[in-house]
Amino acid sequence: MKPLPALLIVSVAVALAKPACAEPATPTLEACKAARFAPNGKTPNLQGQWDFLMQVGKASSPGVIAIGPMDGAYTGSLHPYRTNTVVIRRLTLDGDGAVRMSVATREGEIGFRGQLTGGPDTICGSGLYHGGVDYQLVAVRRPTSYVPR
């Protein structure tokens, strides 16, 4: 086979292949109106990338959350598009679908309490931001072909 046709075949195969990274989701607070999701039997694996929208007062803050397993719970990072990346110290999922998250920021810890909503790929909830300001958060997992072990 000549090099040019082989290169053409590889280029077409790469162009048609399923992307390795998932397209961003567009979370809205409307997703939080869905029924609570309680896992039936097997606890869902929350590992992956999640697009989020945080509403603090009248200000919206979108971004990405990266979650991975650590010591029987999860940890990761929260990347708001408009501010600094912060560390998720611990994220837990209870058997009833309740989600709790502790986030470290320069100003101190921020807590979050939420729930899987509508299915295992949407988290909705709220917490107290610095100075006691309430915030709402919705996160939607990006689709992926990765299968956790």
Image: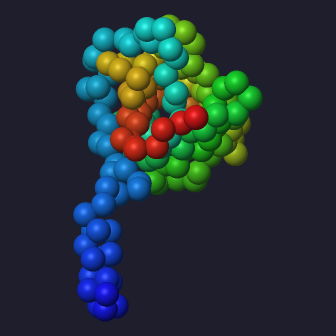
Residue furthest to the right in view is 71
| The image quarter in which residue 5 lies | bottom left
Its colouring scheme is rainbow
Residue 96 to residue 128: above or below: above
Residue 23 visible? The answer is yes
Task: Give the residue at the far front of this rendering.
Answer: 1
Query: In this picture, is 7 found above or below 130?
Result: below
Q: Which of 143 and 99 is in front in this view?
A: 143
Q: How many labels does the image show?
A: 0
Q: Residue at point 32% right, 18% down? A: 118
User: In which quadrant of the rendered view does residue 112 lie?
Assistant: top right
Against 121, is 116 above or below? Answer: above
Answer left or right for 55 relative to 105. Answer: left
> Residue at the spot x=29%, y=34% of the render?
28
Of the 4 image quadrants, the one containing the N terminus is bottom left
Residue in the image at 29% along x and 25% along y: 31
Between residues 131 and 66, which one lies in front from this camera angle? 66
x and y percent of residue 82 in the render? 46, 54
Q: Quadrant of the C terminus?
A: top right
| Horizontal arrangement in the rendering, residue 18 relative to residue 114 (left or right) | left
Residue at 58% from the left image edge and 53% from the top image edge: 84
Q: Residue 97 location in percent, x, y?
A: 48, 13
Q: 84 or 6, which lies in front?
A: 6
Q: In the picture shown, does residue 3 fall above or below 21?
A: below
